[in-house]
Image: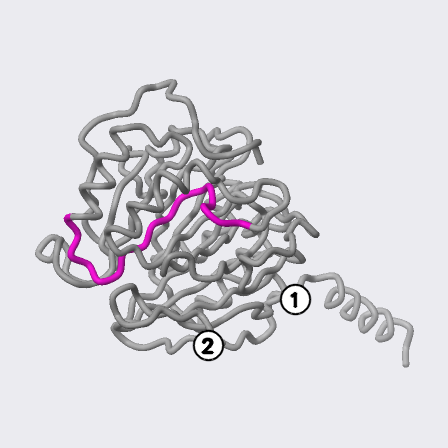
Amino acid sequence: MSAMRYARRAALLLALLASPPLARAQTIDLPNKDGSVRFAVMGDTGRGDAGQFDMAKVMETVHAKFPFTFMVMVGDNIYGADTPGDYQQKFEKPYKPLIDAGVKFYAALGNHDNPNQRFYKQFNMNGERFYTFRASPGGLAKLTTGGVRFFAIDSNYLDKSQLDWLSKELAASGSEWKICFFHHPLYSSGATHGSALETRAVLEPMFVKDGVSVVLTGHDHIYERIKLQKGIQHFVVGSGGSLRRGDLRQTDMTAKGSDQDYVFMIAEIDGDEMHYQAISRKGTTIDSGAIKRVGAGVASAASPAPAAASKPASKPPANKKRTPSKKPS
């Protein structure tokens, strides 16, 4: 073999070994049915570093096989400075293929997020800290009947105006599926933060009373599917762009968890079932299964185009004390 040919082969091999394993074929465990509600979940992402870009590439690869229509962001969307250049580096560049494909992003605020993120058009918050949107077909004509509805909560400031709004919206919604997403987990085995107990005491009774089926959070930089709590399925998806290896403690809350790599989650709601699949930066499936919605029989987590927003009536006090987290992350 000539020296030039050998050098070319060696260079190609080194390039393959050096590049992250993003192009590997990814098996999608979800039904991927026409007419279903297909979405993804990511949290603690906005660093603008290589890890975030690697994870975004996996999301792009998965989207080509499982075309989710929107992405739920559970907070810490932009770490550090948030100039226009930061929004480009920490959001627009890594997720450009998804944005170009028409994926819509819905953000909740994390403890590292400037509240002014609510005015950033791509986060679809419409200037509000907390809001709701219908994820299933029907739009304004079916605001209170059937389908799937998401509720974005600002768990940094659970003031009276937000709690009154949430109580009213949950009670008024006739959607079969009610899904809440916010930053601080009500249940978590993360060693750095763990469960936000004060926040749980406030929110959980409301969720139980009004039939919330799923809660999506972040804050701890791990992935964890919690065992059913009062009939509700909780997920911690806080390693979409940040990771604390070894932070997942051994507790009796954990149904499945990972603290070894970046993870995001895809989900599909078809009738009374929500299928989910958690995927790592290597393209490996680390968790998958299906749950039943509240009110559709016994819930189980054992088996391995969004429209109108409803706005709160009033603005919160500017310097209201934050309730939930123990220390920043």
Label 2 vs 1, first from the N-terminus: 1
Per the rendering, the mark at residue 303 is 2
Give the answer, above or below, for where 190 lies relative to 32: above
Position in image of residue 7 (x %, y %): 86, 69
Q: Quadrant of residue 23?
A: bottom right
Give the answer, above or below, for where 26 lies relative to 75: below
CA neighbours of label 2 inside 10 A, class few (<14), some (14 to 19), many (20+): few
Position in image of residue 110 (x %, y %): 46, 37
**Point 41% across, 42% down: residue:** 200
CA neighbours of label 1 inside 10 A, class few (<14), some (14 to 19), many (20+): some
Looking at the picture, which amino acid does disc 1 mark? Answer: Pro
**Residue behind mark 1:** 21
Q: Quadrant of the N terminus?
A: bottom right
Looking at the picture, which amino acid does disc 2 mark? Answer: Ser
Query: In what element is the residue under mark 2?
Result: loop
For the rendered model, the colour scheme is one colour
Position in image of residue 146 (x %, y %): 16, 63
The residue lying furthest to the left in this view is 141
The residue lying furthest to the bottom in this view is 1
Left or right for 277, reference 294 = right
Q: Main secondary structure of the magenta part?
A: loop
**Point 51% across, 67% down: residue:** 61
Per the rendering, the mark at residue 254 is none
**Point 30% across, 38% down: residue:** 130
Position in image of residue 170 (x %, y %): 22, 48
Q: Is residue 185 magenta?
A: yes
Query: In what element is the residue under mark 1?
Result: loop
Structural distance between the alpha carbons of marks 2 and 1: 27 Å
Q: Is residue 114 magenta?
A: no
**Point 27% across, 28% down: residue:** 160
Q: Which residues are magenta?
A: 172-188
